[in-house]
Image: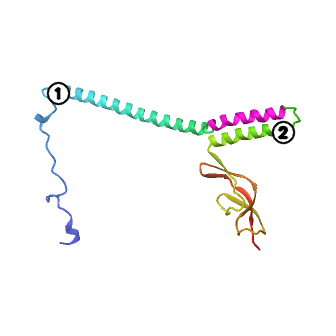
């Protein structure tokens, strides 16, 4: 058989196509048995209208759920920092109080600053902000530290000699690396 003759002739049966089934009027749903065709049409039209109504209601409910979820995400982004800000407000109050104080007592000023720093560190803790403050002699980590200079030292190469500025991370993401000088044994 050649390629041209491989297609099915109209009189041949295609085994992949099922023969059509004739509808038996006696197999109609019970509620339609005994009705005239006008009654059947009215009944079917009513069912169709009911199903369309149900479909439109389900579709509208789905759209409402999607819209509410989008609004919730927008609000979450907008107010995500709210709890952190609530913990920072007392720090601001303490700083204003320190600026308005007329005390010349250095010891009292230092104690006030220490209390304010504790408040700030508490706010950082609640906001999941952690301090990056490497100890002298720690191995330089380029993911958490930024080397500003390399200085001659007796320490092992690429270890922290001094910390110029502390770094901070939030939830394992670096906000600012710690600024350090590293050893350069020469």
Where 119 falls versus 160 (above or below)? above
Question: Is 175 in front, or is 139?
Answer: 139
Where 19 falls versus 119 (above or below)? below
Q: Badge 1: how crowded within 10 Å, few (<14), some, or many (20+)? A: few
Q: Secondary structure at mark 1?
A: helix
Residue 171: image x %, image y %? 59, 48
Question: Is 114 in front, or is 14?
Answer: 114
Residue 15: image x %, image y %? 16, 58
Residue 69 shown left or right of residue 164 in the figure: left
Q: Residue sitting at 14 percent across and 40 percent down?
A: 23
For this orientation, the residue located farthest to the bottom is 186
For this orientation, the residue located farthest to the front is 107
Q: Residue sitting at 53 percent across and 36 percent down?
A: 72
What segment carries the magenta color?
82-100
For this orientation, the residue located farthest to the left is 26
> Quadrant of the image for the C terminus?
bottom right
Q: Residue sitting at 12 percent across and 35 percent down?
A: 27
Disc number for residue 31: 1
Disc number for residue 129: none
What colouring method underlies this structural image?
rainbow
Foreground disc of the pair 2, 1? 2
Residue 85: image x %, image y %? 66, 36
Where 34 falls versus 136 (above or below)? above
* Residue 25, image quadrant: top left
Disc number for residue 107: 2
**Real-space CA distance between mark 2 and mark 1, rounded to the nearest whole angstrom:** 94 Å
- Reply yes or no: does residue 166 show up in magenta: no
Question: Is 127 in front, or is 110?
Answer: 110
Q: Secondary structure at mark 2?
A: helix
For this orientation, the residue located farthest to the right is 104
* Residue 76, image quadrant: top right
């Amino acid at each position: 058989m050649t390629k041209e003759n491989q297609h099915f002739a109209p009189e041949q049966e295609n085994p992949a196509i099922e023969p059509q089934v004739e509808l038996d009027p006696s197999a109609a749903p019970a509620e339609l048995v005994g009705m005239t065709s006008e009654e059947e049409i009215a009944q079917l039209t009513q069912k169709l209208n009911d199903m369309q109504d149900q479909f439109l209601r389900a579709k509208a409910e789905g759209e409402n759920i999607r819209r509410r979820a989008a609004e919730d995400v927008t609000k979450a982004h907008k107010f995500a920092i709210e709890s952190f800000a609530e913990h920072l407000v007392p720090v601001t109050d303490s700083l204003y109080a320190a600026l308005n104080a007329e005390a010349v007592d250095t010891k009292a000023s230092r104690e006030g600053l220490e209390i304010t720093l504790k408040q700030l560190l508490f706010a950082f803790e609640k906001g999941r902000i952690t301090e990056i403050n490497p100890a002298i002699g720690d191995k330089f980590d380029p993911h958490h530290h930024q080397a500003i200079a390399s200085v001659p030292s007796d320490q092992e190469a690429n270890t922290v000699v001094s910390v110029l500025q502390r770094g901070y991370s939030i939830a394992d993401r670096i906000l600012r690396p710690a600024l350090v000088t590293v050893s350069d044994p020469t």
